[in-house]
Image (spheres, rainbow, N blue to C red):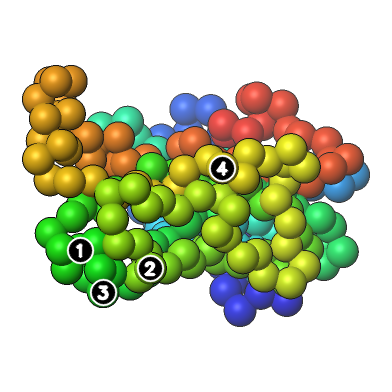
Amino acid sequence: MSNISLKLETRTAEGKKVSKLRQAGIIPSVVYGGNDQPIMTQSSLAETAKVVGRVGKHTPLDLLIDGHKKLAIIKDIDRDPVRHSLRHVAFHTISQNDIITTEVPIILVGQGESAAERAGLVILQALEHIEVKAKPADLPESIELSIVDLATDEDKLTVADIKLPAGVEFDDMDQDMELVIANVYEPGALQAANEATGGDAEAETEVPVEGEDSAVEVAGDAKPTETEAKK
C-alpha cells in the first residue's frame, strides 16, 4: 500500500455545473481501471494540489472513495493554461501485481562538487525524464545520477550511466543507452551557441509543467471515453 492518500467523494455534478465546483474550491476527477465503470469523483483543491505535487504521475497513492480504499496512480492532470491551476485529475486504479509503465524524473546530484564545475565549466541537463516499468511497490519516485565524476568538456552522462533499482526496467527494450543526459560546456562555447541560436541553451532543459507531457500505462485496462475523462 502507498503511504500517500487522498480522500474523494462521489460526484453528481457534471457539464456546466462543474465550473461551480471549481469556484467553491472543489476539483472534479474521475477514477477508472480494470473492468469497473469509471467513477466521477471530487475533492478539496488544497488537498488535491498538495497530493498531486507529491506523487506526480509516477508514484502510487491510496484513494479513499466514500470509505473504500483503492490503490491508484495519476493518469492525467488538466491545468488552466494561464494560471496552471488544477482543473481536473484522472486516476487509474492498479493492483500490487500490475506492471506500471511511467516516466520518472532524472535528478542530477553532486552539484558544485565536480572537478568540471570547480574548473569553471558548466553542466547542463539534456534529458529530464526516462520511461521505466515496474510493480507499484518498486516504482522509484526519481532516478538520481551523480555528476561528481565529470571533469572536462569532453565528459558526459548517458542512459548507460543509470543504475536502475531492483525490480525496475527500462520500458523500451531497445533503449538507446548512448542517449545523453548531461553535457559539460566551456562557458565561452555555451555563450557563443546561445548567441548563434538567438536563445538560451538552458531553456531547452526547462521542466514542463507537471503532468502535461508524461504518461502512465497499465496493460489490458479499458480507458474512459474522452467525455468521461474531462468531466
Marking on residue 113: 3
- Mark 1 touches mark 4? (CB < 8 Å): no
Cα–Cα span, label 1 and label 2: 10 Å
- Mark 2 touches mark 3? (CB < 8 Å): no
Image quadrant containing the N terminus: bottom right
Q: Residue 125 vs residue 68: left or right?
A: left
- Mark 3 touches mark 1? (CB < 8 Å): yes
* Residue at image location 47% in from the left, 43% down from the top: 180
Q: Which residue is mark 1?
A: 117
Q: Where does residue 161 sit, x and y in percent of width and height? A: 55, 59
Residue 188 visible from this viewpoint: yes
Q: Where does residue 112 sit, x and y in percent of width and height? A: 22, 70
Q: Which residue is mark 4?
A: 178
Image quadrant containing the C terminus: top right
Identify which residue, 24 or 63, lies in the foreground.
63
Name which residue type carries label 1: Glu
Tally the numbered discs. 4
Q: Which residue is mark 2?
A: 149
- Mark 1 touches mark 2? (CB < 8 Å): no
Question: Helix or strand or loop: what does disc 3 sit on?
Answer: loop
Name which residue type carries label 4: Glu
Closer mark to the observer between disc 2 and disc 3:
2
